[in-house]
Amino acid sequence: MTLTIRRYRWSDLEAVWALHQICLAQVGLASGDGVYYEDDFPRINEVYLADRGEFLVGEDDEGDGAPRIVAMGGLRRIDAQAAEMCRLRVHPEFQRRGYGERILLALESRAIVLGYQTVRGDTTLNQSAAIALYHKYGWREISRADVGGLVVIYGEKNLVKETAQQLATPGT
């Protein structure tokens, strides 16, 4: 089983929506609960791709040759210098294989290419795997808020500083 990362296509909408719902349910959330906005899904091309952003899907062939979308993530423009990383999801059956890490790194790389200096994002306190992933890759917590009874952690990463450190340290 291998993950192939590619850009979102309009024909992916149904699979992306299903993955979103499965992953929300895994952490005790549901569509329309007021915690997460979802109006971007039918407009992925407009919200992400056509507005200096990105939306990636990860396909796994499950060993039978039929690719299935099992991971995803988006990059949405906030302003000229910053983008929001959002919709980072990995199907529960495919977690702990590094798929989330690969999507995160691909989106960070794309943000650099698009000229962003900072990426921001959020997760809930009960999503310990997401918190650990962001921390591992140099994201820092900037604030917390109670949203719909959940503690939401807001974080960011300075891509300019990170890129400069990588260039200054050979072999990274």
Image (spheres, grey):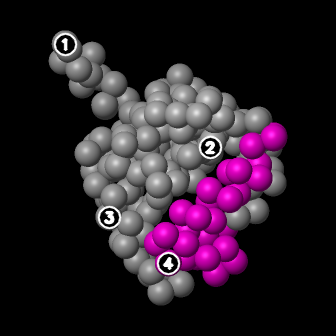
Alpha-carbon span between mark 2 and mark 4 = 22 Å
Nearer to us in this view, 115 or 95: 95
Query: Residue at (70%, 36%) from the top-left corner?
Result: 8
Front: mark 2 or 4: 2
Query: Residue at (81%, 41%) from the top-left corner?
Result: 11
- The tag earlier along the polypeptide, 2 or 1, is 2
Q: Is residue 17 visible?
A: yes
Front: mark 4 or 1: 4
- The tag earlier along the polypeptide, 1 or 3, is 3
Q: Is 35 in the magenta?
A: yes
- The tag earlier along the polypeptide, 3 or 2, is 2
Alpha-carbon span between mark 3 and mark 2 = 23 Å
The amino acid pointed to by label 1 is: Pro
Find residue 69 and name its label: 2
Instruction: Report the residue marked by disc 1.
Output: 170
Left or right: residue 43 versus residue 83 is: right
Alpha-carbon span between mark 2 and mark 1 = 35 Å
Element carrying mark 4: loop
**Residue 115 versus residue 134 in the image, above or below:** above
Element carrying mark 2: strand
Q: Is residue 144 visible?
A: no
Element carrying mark 3: helix
Q: Which residues are magenta?
A: 10-37
The amino acid pointed to by label 3 is: Ser
Report x, y in % for residue 169: 18, 18
Left or right: residue 32 versus residue 109 is: right
Report x, y in % for residue 150: 45, 80
